[in-house]
Image: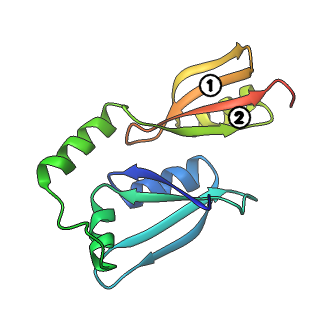
Amino acid sequence: MSHATIYVLDQDQAKDFYVNKLGFEIKVDQSLPSGFRWLTVAPKGQSDLEIILMKVGSGSDFIQMKGGSGGKNDTKDLDAMAALLKKGMFSAGAFRTADCRKTFAELKAKGVEFISEPKDQFYGVEAVFKDPFGNWFSMSQPKNY
């Protein structure tokens, strides 16, 4: 897999969070004439996977432009997806860190909201944080690190 999608409600706010708080780097930030914006980021030094920060609803427009069957978005569906996102119903993934407690302290100082503080688990040390839209992530330090 070369790309994974995280849905967001505002791409500028997402870019600020993932770049300025988490320390990721921008890989691509381009807008098409139609207004569709392709925004990808990745943890610094990670070149094999880019994270697409996709605005809710914009993906269907992109599929339609490419000749797919995406069609125009139904407002009720977009509202439902945005509501689920805000409720924290999506777990967007897990990030590995060499020192969970140190990274927790650094990110908390930058204003990142944590759902749980670092805890010893059978697989290592884990803390859980969320982005401004409700996506939540496990931040883990494996035992073998």
Taking depth in this image into account, of 101 and 4 the one nearest to the observer is 4
Q: Nearer the viewer, mark 1 or mark 2?
A: 1
Q: Position of residue 108 (x, y in %)?
A: 59, 32
- The residue lying at 44 percent from left, 70 percent from top is 38
Query: Taking 7 as reference, is 72 above or below it?
Result: below
The amino acid marked with disc number 1 is Ala
Quarter of the image with the C terminus is: top right
Left/right placement of residue 37 relative to residue 80 reads: right
The numbered dot on residue 127 is: 1
CB contact under 8 Å: marks 1 and 2: yes
Secondary structure state at the residue bearing disc 2: helix
Q: Position of residue 120 (x, y in %)?
A: 72, 14
Residue at the spot of label 2:
103
Pointer 2 local density, CA inside 10 Å: few below 14, some 14–19, many at least 20:
some
The amino acid marked with disc number 2 is Thr
Q: Which of the 4 image quarters holds residue 49?
A: bottom right
